[in-house]
Amino acid sequence: MFQRAMKEVYYTPVEKKPRLAPKPYTCPEMPLKEPVSVFCRIRPPEDDNEDAFTTPVDSRTVKLTPPVTSFAFRNGSAKEQLFRFKHVFASDASQKEVFDHVAKPLIGDLLNGKNGLLFVYGITGSGKTYTMEGTRSDGGILRRTIDVIFNSINKLQSMKYVFKPDRMNGFEIQSEADAMLDRQRIDVMKSNRRYARYRKEVSGSQDSYERIPDSSHIGNVDEDNVYGVFVNYLEIYNNYIYDLLEEFSENNMVKDLQSKILREDSKRNMYVHGCTEVEVLAKGQKRRKVAHTRLNCESSRSHSIFNVRIVQAPHDAQGEAIVMDKAAIITSQFSMVDLAGSERNNRTKATGERIKEAGNINNSLMALRQCIECLRENQLNRGTRKVPYRESKLTHYFKNYFEGEGKVNMIVCVNPKLENYDETLPVMKFAELASEVQVHRPASSVRPDLGFTPEIVDITPVYSLAPSWPTMEYTSESSFEEMVENLKIYLQKRLATKEKFNSELSEQRINVRERIMEMEKENVYLRQESGSLRSLYDDAMKKVKHYESLLLNAEADNDSLQRKLTEYITIVDDYNQACEERDMAKSQGQLEKQRMKARLKAKLEAEREKLAREMRTKLKEQKGQLKSQMYVTQVKALQAMFDNPQTPAVKDNSKGSHSVKRSLSDPKVNEPTNNAMDSESPPARIATRQQHRRSLSQGANVGPVWIDHRPDQVVEPGTLLQPNMPRRRSVRLLKSEDIESKKASHYCLTTQGEDSSGEIATKMYKGNILPTVGGGAQVVFQDVEILKQKDPLDVCAVKRGCDGAPKVDLQTLQNRCAVGLTSVSASQATSYAKKMRK
Ligand SMILES: Nc1ncnc2c1ncn2[C@@H]1O[C@H](COP(=O)(O)OP(=O)(O)OP(=O)(O)O)[C@@H](O)[C@H]1O
């Protein structure tokens, strides 16, 4: 509009025609958002007689008819469905037609500094690879793209190595002289024999066959720029990214490709770190992983991504040299993605590794689908759901496209064979969904102001309302009228021009205001982005500080641990030394101990020997004393017999034995008992004491016959006093015959147990065996003897209730008998014996 107006107005021409400042790439009419353009391509049937489930209705619509074999038909939900696309390519559509419709506009964008993404989607064998790569004679989108790019930039292509990838998704620029040096260096390398052999091997896949190149070109290429064309070829296989153009080392031609990592550059664009950017085409195709499945021998099991990057930089004002400023470089990218086929495992009979591949393929396609769905949902409902780009490498890599870094086109490939209906239906639905998603178009790709244009040349045209004023001179009346007429015409022209200028001015004002508003919007967006970037930066800085403090703490901990370790090592050394010393001392101590033990043992033996000797001597002395006392008593008894012939011998015996017993007892203890005994009548005394007699002099065949009933295990009291049972028969198990025997007249039951103070008490329940009326026998218990053995030092405390200290010295106690006799009444004994029997 402005230029059209310029043609009609007068301007003052400048002397030298300046080169116009580079046009900004902004197109004000361009919408900020536009939908993903989805195209459909139906491949021709393999067999001419083959039925198809697709019917193109018009250039934008295709109808899908479910065949009888389809799942929908079987479950009764079969119905014809129409799907609308931006364009439907019927089976007879040529490669050129597809390219011109789908890819060429994106190449136009590419050369104008904008990004573009084109991916082909469909089930296996539907013609994705055919569409992308084509055949040897009839190239697909990929080859045609390169053809058209070179046709368009033609002589504007920069010398090789003027642009150099900086390995951070950007490019550096160098002078042509430096570029020439680089070329020479590479040429020397190429002449290396081994390298030449390698080049020959890898370039075997190059475009060496006959192919008619695409001859079309893009018209509106900025001729003031120089262009560099770079390509990289990537593959996503099992969710790993591989660089298909990676150079092999000379020694390792067949090494496996190493997976690459995704990174974000300084402008938050995703890129594959360390991938090879070359100007060589089709180099990576041979190395693409192509697996054999049952459906399609050439079925791709990986997503392949062919990226073409255009780098452009302006010439200087004289149009001679490139501006050597990195900020002046504009980079744009066109990504062509051949997605792996989305087939079902059971149909392809995939097993093992194939199933894993299929899983990964389906996962990444599913992730793509989810991202598209999420974007659509957010756009419809003004939602802010997080788009799951990071779910797979495929979506993560292309997230920028969906967030406004360029236009997105998609071709859905369809194999119309009837058996493919079930799998094609979800593909079509996905395509329909994708076509509803709006992606941002980049608002502008403004070349930075290089600052030279306004200062070097003034390109502003000089406006004037009209040429110079007409002459105001007149000579006559007629000439005056003529002058007035001319003036009138002149003024009218001026007024008309002025009005025109005014209307143009208001129009331009509107334009400028619109642009200002757009810029304002952009500004807001940029401000938001810068805010979010700043917060990201702040977060990152916080994290860095946090990690630094953690690191410092960890280092401090490490130091203190090191110190502790050294201390512990010293302690352990000391301890080991102490252990060694102790072991030595221990072995010496043991020797000493053994010696001491032997000495003590010898001493003990000597003591024992001495004690035994003394005991024997003492015993002899006591025996002597006893004998002499017995003789005295016997003499006295005989004398009494002679004096009183009625006194029975037994009485004498009992008395004698009693007296013998007393002589063995402590005189102090026995004294009252003697008195009591003395107060009783002699026959009663004999009857009572007969039971307690301790016989040391009884003849073997004199006196009653005792049945000595003893338990199996009795602790031998080891006392000198023994029960008076001269004729006895010991039984362990009492039988009725033992009692009924005519010979037995007395019975003694021995028991043992602990008394209340925990000492062993031996009890002897004694009784007479009497015949019963029925002809049997019975025992009538008369007496119980209790024999207790006590610690001599405790005797005083227990028996006499003193304060616990022994009241007699050890010698006195030794002289006493350790056995005391206690008698109980016959009735008590009988009741006790009955209890025992129970
Ligand atoms: N439009 C077409 N015209 C002629 N032949 C075609 C067309 N589309 C596909 N074909 C042929 O069909 C076969 C399978 O096509 P292609 O390999 O492109 O399928 P694909 O979708 O890439 O399969 P996959 O996903 O398994 O890689 C090839 O032999 C190809 O030549």
Image (cartoon, grey):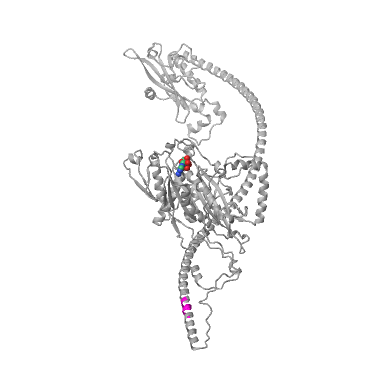
Q: Along the horizontal axis of the image, is 81 left or right of 815? A: left
**Range of the magenta residues?**
491-496
Compared to residue 113, the image places residue 632 above or below, namely: above
Residue 269: x and y in percent read 53, 54
Residue 665: x and y in percent read 51, 24
Q: Along the horizontal axis of the image, is 169 left or right of 653? A: right
Whether residue 339 is visible here, answered yes or no, is: no
Of the pair 180 and 548, the residue shown nearer to us: 180
Compared to residue 516, the image places residue 388 above or below, namely: above
Q: Along the horizontal axis of the image, is 17 left or right of 786? A: right
Residue 171: x and y in percent read 59, 54
Compared to residue 236, the image places residue 266 above or below, namely: below
Residue 252: x and y in percent read 62, 39
Of the pair 767 and 462, the residue shown nearer to us: 462
Q: Residue furthest bottom?
A: 476
Of the pair 149 and 324, the residue shown nearer to us: 149
Compared to residue 612, the image places residue 16 above or below, namely: below
Quadrant of the image occupied by residue 383? bottom left
Q: How many marks?
A: 0
